[in-house]
Amino acid sequence: MATAAPSAASRIAVVTGASSGIGAATARQLAEAGYRVVLTARRKDRIEALAEELTKAGHSALAYQLDVTDRAAVDEFAGAFKTIGVLVNNAGGALGADPVATGDPADWRTMYETNVIGTLNLTQALLPKLIESGDGVVVVVSSTAGHGTYEGGGGYVAAKHGSHVLAETLRLEIVGKPVRVVEIAPGMVKTEEFALTRFGGDTQKAEKVYQGVAEPLTADDVAETITWAVTRPSHVNVDLLVLRPRAQASNTKVHRES
C-alpha cells in the first residue's frame, strides 16, 4: 500500500549524525519520501556536501553544524523552528571493546554523553515542536546491544540500554499526545566508520568484526526501515523493531563462512 505524503505541518525531518552511515542514508530516504530534511552533525563539510547533493536532486535540505552533547547549542538550534515533524536521534557510536575491569572511563562517559544525553537533549528541545506539528515522530536509533550484552561491550551496551529505556519511558509519558515514539535497534551493520571509530582507526580490528559474514546489514537497510516506520499512518506506532542480518542470530551468535 502506498504511503501518504507527510502533511505540511509535519514534513520537516531532523536527522542527527547525518554526516555518514545510517544518518546520511536516512536523510536521503526521508528526502525521497517527501520530507524537508535538516542534517545535523559536527562535521560541517560532510553535511553541507550532502545537503547540496539532495538539493541538486530536487529535494529540500538544510545543513546545520551541531554537537548533540552541547545543550546550549541544541536549544539555539531548536529555536529556529516553529514545528518539526520528525526527529531521528541517530548520533552515537561505540568506543573500545575492553572488559569492564580495564575499560576506559573516559570512553564510557563519551558513549553515554553521545548516545543518551545527546538523544535526551534533542528530544527535550524539539518535543514541543513535534507536538505542535499535530503528527510528530521521535525515532531513537538504538542497537541490539541495548537488548543483550556481550563480552567487551559493557560501555556501549550500557549506553544503548540507556537510549532504549529513554524511548520506552517517553512513550509512556506522552501517550495521548500527537507524537509517536519509535525505536529501531539494528544488529550488525557494516558502514565505513562505525567499527573503525570503535577501534581507534585500527583497520585490521575493524575488518575482523565482519570477517566471514557474507551480507551484514547496510546503512541503506536501516534507513529504509526507519523511513518505513516513520511513514506508517499516524495511528500506527512501531514501538520497537529489531533488525539483524540473516547471518546474525544474536549478539554472540553469528554465522561466518570460512
Image (tube, grey):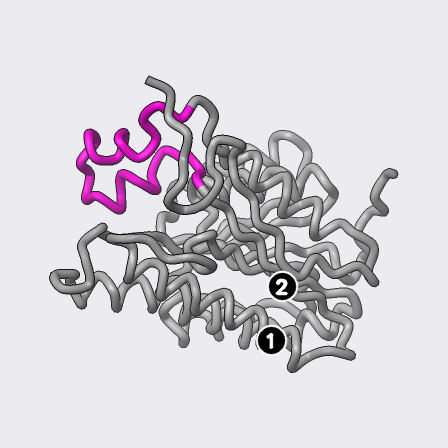
Residue at image location 44% in from the left, 60% down from the top: 146
Marks 2 & 1, CB-CB < 8 Å contact: yes
Task: Decide: few, some or many residues near mark 1? Use Cα within 10 Å; few <14, some 14-19, many ≥20.
Answer: some
Instruction: Reply yes or no: does residue 209 show up in magenta.
Output: yes
Query: Which residue is tagged 2?
Result: 138
Instruction: Reply yes or no: does residue 84 show up in magenta.
Output: no
Q: Nearer the viewer, residue 149 or 22?
A: 149
Q: Nearer the viewer, residue 88 or 37?
A: 88
Residue at image location 47% in from the left, 52% down from the top: 144
Residue at image location 70% in from the left, 57% down from the top: 238
Q: Secondary structure at mark 2?
A: strand
Residue 166 at x, y = what percent? 52, 72
Task: Decide: few, some or many residues near mark 2? Use Cα within 10 Å; few <14, some 14-19, many ≥20.
Answer: many
Residue 11 at x, y = what percent? 73, 55
Where residue 78 sits, quadrant-wise, is: bottom right
Numbered label attached to residue 170: 1
Q: Earlier in the sequence, mark 2 or mark 1?
A: 2
Question: In this rendering, is residue 98 above or below 56?
Answer: below
Q: Residue furthest top?
A: 258
Residue 173 at x, y = what percent? 65, 82
Numbered disc in front, either 2 or 1: 1
Residue at image location 61% in from the left, 36% down from the top: 55
Task: Indicate left or right for 251 with 230 as reference.
Answer: left
Q: From which residue to which does the magenta span run? A: 188-213
Report the amino acid beneath label 1. Leu
Q: Is residue 65 visible?
A: no
